Amino acid sequence: MAKGRKALKYGRAQDATTCFEKALMAQPQRADLWSLRAESLMALGQPDAAVQSLCRALVLAPGDAKGHNNLGVILVSQGKFDEAVASFRRAVRLDPDYLVALNNLGQALDEQNRRHTGEPTDQAAEVQAPSDAVAAFQQATALYSLKRYNEAIVQLELATSLDPSYIDAWTNLGLAWAECNQPEKAIPCFERSLALRENAGIRLAMATVLPIMPDSTEAIAFWRARYMAELQQLQATGVRLADPVGEVLTASFYLAYHGAADRPFQEALAAYFRSACARLSWVAPHCHRSMPLASQGGKIRIGIVSAHLWPGHTIGKLNGGFLQHLDRSRFTVSYVCTGRQTAEAVSMAGQADDALWLAGDLTTMQGQVAERQFDVLFYTDIGMDVITYFLAFARLAPVQCVTWGHPVTTGLPNMDYFLSSAALETPDAQRHYTERLVLLHGLPTCYQQPDGEAVEVDRNRFGFAPDWHVYACPQSLFKFHPGADSLWAAILRSDPAGRFVVIESDESAVTQALQQRWLAAFPDVYERVVFLPRQSGPAFRVLLASVDVLLDTPYFGGGNTSLEATSLGTPIVTCPGPLMKTRVTQAIYQRMGSTETVAATSEEYVALAIRLGTDADWRTQVSQRLIADRHLLFGDLAVVRELERFFGAAVDAAREDRQVTDWQDGWRPTLSDAPTHPAAMNEV
């Protein structure tokens, strides 16, 4: 059994399974062996066999709460939510303090109800009535899992009042206040937790907490300065982490929305983590410079890494084409999933040659990836989830690169390349990246054209009056930088028939914070701001088709939304800045040869918006041109072919212990492999 555990720890799942099965031949009544076999089978991507093995373990040890929880997790990955809920309930009944099972139960109940009714459920909040501190904490945990943070805060405050020494309640209260956009209330809660017990993860959460919806540019400056100072203090005091994946509660996601260059912050954060946990910088055996690349003379082995690579997610839409179209005569393509093994993720994995579903602690997951001996690891996004971020610290392939899923440098020394586009970057852009910046000729996506079915304009559906000029900005609310508030006010003041339409956050506290900020910033026209509830995929497309003008958010612009809107012919006004995260819509329009709604200044941005909103004839002309040229954006195999050549060049360079320093691709597109590429059409 010890040999099997070691094999599992280092990612050798097949060896581990063999060891456990040999042990079971001698000791078939060992429930722990059946459980370990289930874990190794899951690592091999065999959930059905894992369920059978775990059920056998639970027959032998029916009181194992962890086993029932693990069974529920597997059942969720198979989409069997009714059975999963039953398993999680058994785990909670056996161990009422089992927080992981409580959280899983809340999420499973929510998903179960969504599938039946389309709406989230309240059942998870009724796991126990709050008759004492533990019960209040459990109810808060379920509420938190449903993103009902304000209600969770009520129960957590009750728990801490009933038991002031309740460490986990203080911690979760801090996290809930942070989710409610009140970091100033989160910090004292973290301090109370730390006074009761030192914890590196909580200390980091306290140091790096940020407002989701800052109320001013001055507030942004304050919180960024605090973030850097606290981070430097953490590194100076030598706060250590044993397993960052299990200990770190939050990532640095919201830094990217402050409208500033984040390289110093990303590098400081990475430096702290490397000093706090030496294991992060682990080097896989096949990556030692004295060893040849694994695929020398054969196909290049590529692992595409993400927690979000599934059809309905922006990351899946941007990168699914790579998974599907990379040339299998030259490459073996694996999907390395750092997220849950959901039905959607499994469907995307079907486009790869194989899939690797990571599980366990950091060391185990590093070993699972290293066992595959990839030549290239291609991260679609780094910074959106904790597991992907920490996995990227290690040297797990000779070539490691990331692209624009989260359009900010990682700050990681072991990340070799950032794959961007000449259309997305300014001439001096390299200074914003720790990685070597690679400028592809096209946008770094092979985006499938959205559903070809006609989308009917339906203004009545959203309550738009016939005489309204609808200016919409349907972005996540954390993209609304306070520095842009004057633009929205200027547009509304210039067009008395104008309405500014945005989408509510799924957290009411964030929506309320933005409403209060705007009411203070432009009280004279605030009544013409319209907050719509969140829209499903089809309804969102109807909304995009039904508005008059889309307004790109300055400081952090649209990506997937801009592509979808362009496919419908809805014009977008944009004003690119110096950073890639502000330049995507401009790059889309440059690709189509249509830049008439790209502004150079804030004043021009407002003027273009007003002209589009009030001049129906011009708006129609712009829309017709977008529809006529939209085919240029989608299914771009030229960028896939260029990516293949880059991967080949990067692997060749790694064999010589060097990097590709100046990517200059001499390829010219032809109609045979890139029929929609403008250069190919110009050749004709």
Image (tube, helix red, strand yellow):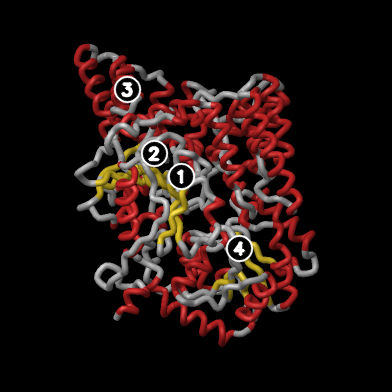
Which residue is pictured at 40% across the width and 49% down the height? Answer: 309
- The answer to whether any part of residue 532 appears in the image is no
Q: Quadrant of residue 580?
A: bottom right
C-alpha separation, residue under disc 4 versus residue under disc 2: 43 Å
Which residue is the site of mark 2? 76
Residue 209: where, in percent of width, then height? 66, 39
Which residue is the site of mark 4? 577
Which of pointers 2 and 3 lies earlier in the amino acid sequence?
3
Label 4, residues with CA under 10 Å away: few <14, some 14-19, many ≥20: some
Instruction: Give residue 36's mark.
Output: 3
User: Which marked residue is nearer to the observer: mark 1 or mark 3?
Assistant: 3
Q: Could you say which is closer to the camera, residue 98 or residue 18? A: 18
Which of pointers 1 and 4 lies earlier in the amino acid sequence?
1
Residue flagged by tag 4: what amino acid is it?
A: Gly
Which residue is pictured at 35% across the width and 72% down the height? Answer: 677
Residue 377: where, in percent of width, then height? 36, 43
Residue 299: where, in percent of width, then height? 22, 46
Asked if the residue at tag 2 contacts the one at tag 4, i.e. Cβ–Cβ closer than 8 Å, the answer is: no
Asked if the residue at tag 2 contacts the one at tag 1, i.e. Cβ–Cβ closer than 8 Å, the answer is: yes
- The answer to whether any part of residue 422 appears in the image is yes
C-alpha separation, residue under disc 1 versus residue under disc 3: 28 Å
C-alpha separation, residue under disc 2 versus residue under disc 3: 19 Å
Which of pointers 3 and 4 lies earlier in the amino acid sequence?
3
User: Which marked residue is nearer to the observer: mark 2 or mark 3?
Assistant: 3
Residue flagged by tag 1: what amino acid is it?
A: Glu
